[in-house]
Amino acid sequence: MKSSLKQYNPQQTEDAWYRYWSENSLFAAHPNSSKEPFTIVIPPPNVTGILHMGHALNNTIQDILIRYHRMKQKECLWMPGTDHAGIATQNVVEKTIAKEGIKRQDLGREKFIERVWQWKEEYGSTIIRQLKKLGSSCDWSRIRFTMDQEYSETVKYVFIALWNKGLIYRDNKVINWCPRCQTALSDEEAPHHQVEGHLYYLRYPLNDDPSHYLVVATTRPETMLGDTAVAVNPKDKRYKKLIGATILLPLMNREIKIIADPMVDMKFGTGAVKVTPAHDPNDYVLGKKHFLEFINVMHPDARMNESAGKYQNMDRFQAREVILEDLKEKQLLERTEAHVLSAGHCYRCHTIIEPYLSWQWFVKMKPLAKPAIEAVKKGKIKFYPRRWTKVYLNWMENIQDWCISRQIWWGHRIPLWYCFDCKKEVFASATQPDACRACGSKNLIQDENVLDTWFSSWLWPFATFYWPKLKEKSPRGTLPEEDLKYFYPTHVLVTAPEIIFFWVARMIMAGLEFMGDIPFRDVYIHGTVRDIEGKKMSKSLGNVINPLEIINEYGACALRFSLISITSQGQDVYLSKERFEQGRNFANKIWNASRFIITHLNRCVISTDLCVFFQKEQLSLANRWILSRFYSLLKAVEKNLAQYRFNEAANLLYGFFWHEFCDWYLEIIKPDIADRQNQIVMYKVLEKFLRILHPYMPFVTEEIWQKLCVPAAPSQEPLSIMTQTWPHIQEQIIDKKVEKQAENLFAIISQIRNMRANLEIPLENSVTVSLFPHTKTHAMLVVQNKRILQTLAKISSLMILEKNQKPSATLSAVTKGIDLYLHFGGIIDIAKEKGKIETKIAQVKKSISSKEQRLKNHDFLKKAPKEVVEKETESKRTLEDELKRLETIKEDIAGT
RNA sequence: GGGCGCAUAGCUCAGUUGGUUAGAGCGCUACAUUCACAUUGUAGAGGUCAUAGGUUCAAGUCCUAUUGCGCCCACCA
């Protein structure tokens, strides 16, 4: 396809400008005492990641904030990096080598890790390249990886610090075990989802009298092989006399006791529950309490083990079927009913979790949580939207110890050493210790486990600055002490709700524990990206819209703008491909309007100072209006950005440019475009608008800005819109009265156009219009702006009718010349209108006086909180303004 | 079991501490193509703001209850 001047072509501009920005180091940030810092750390995407819409949204928001504050002349650091994503990455590489027919065990630990590094070198920067396509202005010279050498040092340092504080312990507990990944998982990594299953009622014969049995209900019958008791509620009359008796466990023929515990719910199932202490977290608790035996019946891959008797080596689900068959045969399966249960699933591979007894390392969380709760309660850290505060606090207050050991190879190996000889001492050490402290043996071995990925991610806001080696120059030549002092705490963390617990909460704890300060002030939680039917976008559902495809087709600016404009604060985002057309069309509109202005621009006007010019010149209504509107827009955009209302700001920018600047302003000045005043205003508004749009649409604004502002001669300094100053709000230019006047004028034009359309008068036919204005103000407005009316409504002559000249018909087409009679404001019964206004005035007056009285009331002033009083005062002021406005209208009507 | 969110135009959704005539995009109808842009312009149709009460001079907005949908957390075997 031939590329046409008439259409903006993002492919021709985006990569080139990104290169220009990078080559001129415009993203780089350094401690600078003359500037205020502004810092964001990126939520590091997984090295296995490829850019999806969630990333696109997340990073667009961060880039908007960074670019905005950079233009506000702050020293802006957006710290980039990637996460080693232990399980996820290991899985990917395992799949890769599986194609060669090998398992990781065939390679051995060292060789396998080598392969993972190889994979990382080859594919690990994919997501980074994609973030660049999006326009992300990170300081790439600072890029970090959660497994790079120095980061690993930080992780070990932190582990040892917690160890020395006694916050790390080992325990043999029932934890979440993924049989596919063959590792322990934290509670957060094993989310519960509903599963359609069955409730099986099993008959357990009494030992003394095998003809009688106790019926227990279970959803996982295969675990019965590991049962070591049956429990009933001590208050349960049905079973009271059986407490203490024994049962002969079917299939295994093991004697097990009937115990009593109040934990048992009498109403569920039969009120009797089989107890499998090694395969259920509740049963584990019962097992501990009643000193039961813990029998593990499964291998780590969820095949039954040697304790499972004849079921050995069957998969857990296969064993389930066979066991049910066997029980049925023995008439021990009483019945089966459908039952919806909620089961933990591995967050990486979605396999159903097996609660599994094993030795794992844990972090005691309560002491870490305490200050993290305080920080949020005291408002040092704020969540946007606010409601997440409660979710955070609720989790924090009920925090459980964190299982941090993983039985995989890819990750930070736990820096603990065991003495092979005396088996007494466990050492925490960043390097291999020389000898055992207890027996002096040199025969030491390191713990086989690696740490949970999130055990490195939670240090991200300061580990990325090479903490804790403060006084040592980092590999990139910076001094961590200086960087941290300047850039930490960071300002805002932008993330999705699903990782509040994984990451946000833990970063707050780590920041407070190790830096003695919060890691960020604001947490902006955006919504989850879903498809148009509300489903989460995922590859397996096949409903993915690939952001890179959108970038190729419509451009990064279109993607960014569309994504932002449909993301209201904290709501989920529903996407379909058509949504991106809006962004593409907007980029194109800007492109064409700018092209129009540039071709008609007299470059002499560029150097004019807008404020001086504004004070000195008598400006036309259109010029005063567009300037006022621009600064009103600027004010609103800033306000919305400060409150993280990105979509509001985006929609305001869109509406201003398209409907006010293009549809009205440019159309008005078109006939007089060479006029100096119009030239100046048109240029200034476009130039400033490009600047405030830049954070949203960095490429298209740069492309146009360069054409508009930068002379052909090459300059010494790199010139870019991204380093320009954000415009200052000029309050003196904002004039609400002017805005209202222009709106009135536009309303007249629209009505004339409406009549023309109704009467099917083509635009090439000029018409004569007789106006019957309701108020003096309207009459003045029309007289003064006759030229605009003539241009935009195609009027050949205009008559203003007096009161008594009222035409018989309100609007009619007469004779060949065609006259339009128009009541401005439509057909209005003036008497009725007056009545309405009077009622309204009376209402408002009453309201003001009631507020006045309240504000005079001593009791109220004494008792009411300060904000309430302020609010009352403020609302009284609003009412007074409203009253003034109403009275003007009343006068106006009276004047006709 | 606990917590949170949503319900506004045909569709997808905005609507800020209550305050003029409830908005946008898409879709729909009619007209317009030498004029920056058909990825366009002009005009139009389309709303009992889920339901029922309440607070207020004033409620889409605040309170209470109800209905429907979605999400998160929790040890219902």
Image: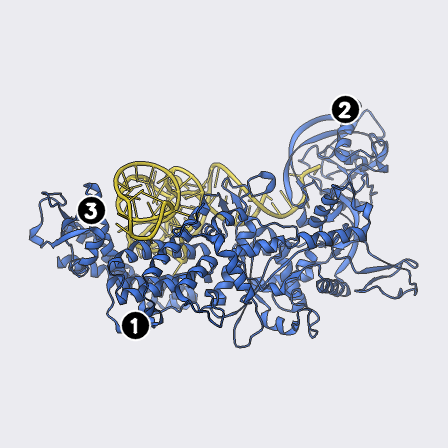
Rendered view: A351 above or below A79 = above
Q: Label 3: which residue? A: A764
Q: Nearer the viewer, mark 1 or mark 2?
A: 1
**Residue A525: where, in percent of width, then height?**
54, 55
Residue type indicated by callout 2: Lys
The residue marked by circle 3 belongs to what chain? A
Query: Is circle 2 on the same chain as circle 3?
Result: yes
Residue A570 seen in the figure: yes
Per the image, label 2 sits on a secondary structure element best described as helix
Mark 1 and mark 3 in contact? Answer it, CB < 8 Å: no
**Residue A776: where, in percent of width, then height?**
15, 59
* Mark 1: few/some/many CA within 10 Å (<14, 14-19, 20+): some
Q: Disc number at residue A613? A: 1
Residue type indicated by callout 3: Glu
The residue marked by circle 2 belongs to what chain? A
| Residue furthest out toward the left | A804
**Residue A845: where, in percent of width, then height?**
25, 60
